[in-house]
Amino acid sequence: MSASCSSVSLELSLVEYDSIISPLLARSTLPIDNVLAALDLLPGDIDEVVMVGGTSRIPQVREEVKRSCEKTELNTHIDPDVTVAYGCAAVID
């Protein structure tokens, strides 16, 4: 018996998409808040924010991180997936 695959097409407006991901965006900066609180730092103490991982490609995530870290620019000049792999390799090394 073989499984069959079917494709589904779904179309969302940007407003609908933003509404759906809004609760996730609010949670996306909790780690930043937790680290700053644990180290007794303020967002202004951060020199640079390097965005890594697949979700760093989402414009809404980038804007939320900018807001949370009080930055006008983020470092997005490196491949977010390769950077994660390098980080894993550095930990193993």
Image (spheres, rainbow, N blue to C red):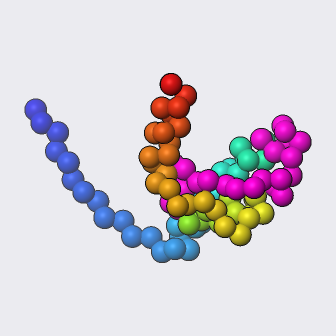
Residue occupying the far left of the picture:
1
* Picture quarter with the N terminus: top left
The one of 79 and 18 positioned closer to us in this rendering: 79
**Residue displayed at 67% across by 55% down:** 49
Q: Is residue 90 above or below residue 12?
A: above
Residue 74 located left or right of residue 83: right
**Residue displayed at 12% across by 36% down:** 2
Residue 66: x and y in percent read 70, 63
Residue 29: x and y in percent read 70, 51
Tell me if residue 87 is in the magenta stretch: no
Tell me if residue 48 is in the magenta stretch: yes
Q: Is residue 71 visible?
A: yes
Image mark count:
0
Residue occupying the far right of the picture:
40
Residue 72 located left or right of residue 43: left
**Residue displayed at 50% across by 46% down:** 83
Q: Is residue 57 above or below residue 88?
A: below
Residue 59: x and y in percent read 56, 66
Residue 7: x and y in percent read 24, 57
The one of 76 and 68 positioned closer to us in this rendering: 76
The one of 65 and 9 positioned closer to us in this rendering: 65
Q: Is residue 22 visible?
A: no
Magenta region: which residues? 35-58
**Residue displayed at 52% across by 67% down:** 17
Residue occupying the far top of the picture:
92
